[in-house]
Amino acid sequence: QVQLVQSGGGLVQAGGSLRLSCAASGRTFNTMGWFRQAPGKEREFVAAISWSGGSTYYADSVKGRFTISRDNAKNTIYLQMNSLKPEDTAVYFCAAKLSGSYYSRSGYGYWGQGTQVTVSS
């Protein structure tokens, strides 16, 4: 049984940092990513990473502030979020891609349970 279990998140002031983790079990995945969903908005792509970690992709809104990484020995990906802004407030989801492009939600077949990130101004 495949599971993606997230940890991290919480409340932080603007300018602060948080780190999210996502541990996969049951199988390994080539590309994994992070998405987020703010209240009343669509779930949007945040970042993705290839198996080797050599290829990373970011939404323009987080580029230069967020860093995605992975530890294949632990079958875990991370999202380091720095210089957080109130507009980063959302529920963050990790996901494992099965097909399609890295930024398209439809290609991700497994999802974590979601974790709340709240950035206060």
Image: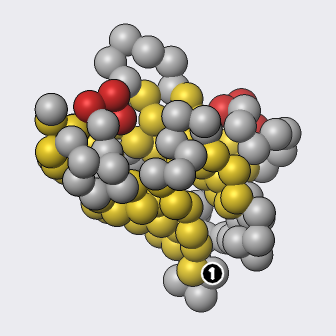
- The residue positioned farthest toward the top in the image shown: 40
Q: Position of residue 89 (x, y in %)?
A: 30, 33
Q: Is residue 102 left or right of residue 96?
A: right
Which of the two residues, 101 or 67, is positioned nearer the viewer here? Answer: 67
Image quadrant where residue 100 sits? top right
Please state which amino acid type lies under the numbered disc 1: Asn
The image's colouring method is secondary structure
Q: Is residue 65 left or right of residue 44?
A: left
Q: Position of residue 6 (x, y in %)?
A: 38, 58
Image quadrant where residue 40 sits? top left
Q: Residue at x 66, y 32 (%)?
A: 105
Q: Which residue is mark 1?
A: 72
Q: Residue at x 52, y 72 (%)?
A: 76
Q: Is residue 10 left or right of residue 110?
A: left
Is residue 95 visible to us here? Answer: no
Q: Residue at x 68, y 42 (%)?
A: 108
Q: Residue at x 59, y 88 (%)?
A: 73
- The residue positioned farthest toward the right in the image shown: 100
Whether 67 is drawn above or below 71: the answer is: above
Say which element carries label 1. Answer: loop
Q: Position of residue 92 (x, y in %)?
A: 40, 42
Is residue 18 visible to us here? Answer: yes
Whether 29 is drawn above or below 104: the answer is: below
Circle 1 Cα neighbour tier, 10 Å, few/some/many (<14 / 14–19 / ≥20): some
Q: Is residue 1 left or right of residue 12?
A: right
Whether 101 is drawn above or below 18: the answer is: above
Q: Position of residue 111 (x, y in %)?
A: 53, 46
* Quadrant in the picture for the C terminus: top left
Which of the two residues, 15 or 94, is positioned nearer the viewer here? Answer: 15
Whether 26 is drawn above or below 108: the answer is: below
